[in-house]
Image: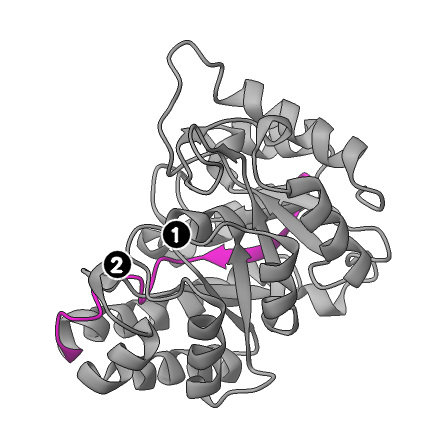
């Protein structure tokens, strides 16, 4: 069996220049095709989420993970993150419905991680239906009304650390409990796991919850971030609301300035490109590979220090 090794032990781990990866399905729904596309587009790292031999990450068998690891190793690719969607469900659903199956699934994901050897195992920020109508801080509301949520994250973080990997939590779109800077900071304080968990900051997911990404927003989150997801979006109105899915070069949030600061600060040695989403698609717009190739070229030309 051939497997990759932990990123931290690799002599060819990310160095001074920031590198790019993307969600694996962006290279194609066929996993072998996706591997080839990663190499064609100059990447050394993969972010595994779904479309892995036709399966989502958590549904892979150990044998299928070994097959994927061997294919990646043969192509000279390493796994940077296992992007699970665990703990991204409804925070109001009750303890067992929110966390029971997800924590059981995490045990299996960590067995896959032993084969695939990522740096990060990702969790998601929980959804809080009705959060936009709340009068106050969503995380404080969750801690008060749904006290099982934060302990579930603690258990997951501890399990990931005990398995030898780094836990990271990504803010989601829609009604994610993580939207304002205060909510992010309050949540990470409540976890009481300094140094054991980091933020995967998806700037446009935050915009989809109502907070437009800016340099000021980034500065408020900087010390939490270890992984950065980037995708294009445009306002069709006052400039504050996310309306349309577009390529990065057409985005109406300061993507080049924010990304440059992230590169200069060294907070995310690998940056993960995502497809534009959470706004409306534009009729006749070339999405798919066309946007991906444009976005990769934009990042490499508009931001200094990206390989």
Residue 78 lies within the magenta run: yes
Residue 272 lies within the magenta run: no
Magenta part, dominant SS? loop
Circle 1 packing at 10 Å, graded few (<14), some (14-19), many (20+), is: some
Kindly indicate whether the residue at mark 2 contacts the one at mark 1 (C-beta within 8 angstroms): yes
Q: For the image shown, how many numbered marks are present on the structure?
A: 2
Please state if 16 lies on the left or on the right of 280 as rendered.
Answer: right
Residue at point 45%, 49% (across, down): 207
Task: Return the residue nearer the eye: 31 or 23.
Answer: 23
The residue beneath circle 2 is 132
In the image, residue 227 sits, relative to residue 32, either above or below, namely: below
The residue beneath circle 1 is 210
Dot 1 or dot 2: first in sequence order is 2
Q: Label for residue 105?
A: none
| Quarter of the figure with the N terminus | bottom right
- Find residue 211 and report its horizontal and vertical position in percent: 45, 54
């Amino acid at each position: 069996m051939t497997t990759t090794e932990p990123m931290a032990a690799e002599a060819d781990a990310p160095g001074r220049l920031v590198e790019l990866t993307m969600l694996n399905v962006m290279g194609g729904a066929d996993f072998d095709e996706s591997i080839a596309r990663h190499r064609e587009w100059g990447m050394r790292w993969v972010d595994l989420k779904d479309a892995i031999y036709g399966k989502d990450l958590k549904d892979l068998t150990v044998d299928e993970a070994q097959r994927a690891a061997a294919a990646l190793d043969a192509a000279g690719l390493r796994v940077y993150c296992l992007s699970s969607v665990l703990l991204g469900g409804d925070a109001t659903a009750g303890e067992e419905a929110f966390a029971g199956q997800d924590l059981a699934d995490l045990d299996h994901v960590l067995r896959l991680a032993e084969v695939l050897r990522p740096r990060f195992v990702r969790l998601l920020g929980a959804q809080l239906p009705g959060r936009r109508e709340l009068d106050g801080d969503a995380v404080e509301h969750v801690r008060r009304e749904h006290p099982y949520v934060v302990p579930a994250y603690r258990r997951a973080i501890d399990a990931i650390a005990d398995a030898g990997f780094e836990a990271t939590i990504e803010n989601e779109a829609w009604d994610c409990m993580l939207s304002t800077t205060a909510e992010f900071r309050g949540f990470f304080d409540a976890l009481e796991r300094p140094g054991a968990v980091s933020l995967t900051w998806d700037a446009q997911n935050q915009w989809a919850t109502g907070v437009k990404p800016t340099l000021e927003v980034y500065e408020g989150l900087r010390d939490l971030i270890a992984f950065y997801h980037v995708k294009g979006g445009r306002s069709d109105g006052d400039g504050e609301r996310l309306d349309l899915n577009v390529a990065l070069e057409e985005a109406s949030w300061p993507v080049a300035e924010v990304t440059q600061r992230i590169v200069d600060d060294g907070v995310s040695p690998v940056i993960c490109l995502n497809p534009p989403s959470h706004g409306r698609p534009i009729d006749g717009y070339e999405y798919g590979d066309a946007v991906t190739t444009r976005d990769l070229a934009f990042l490499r030309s508009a931001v200094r220090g990206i390989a």
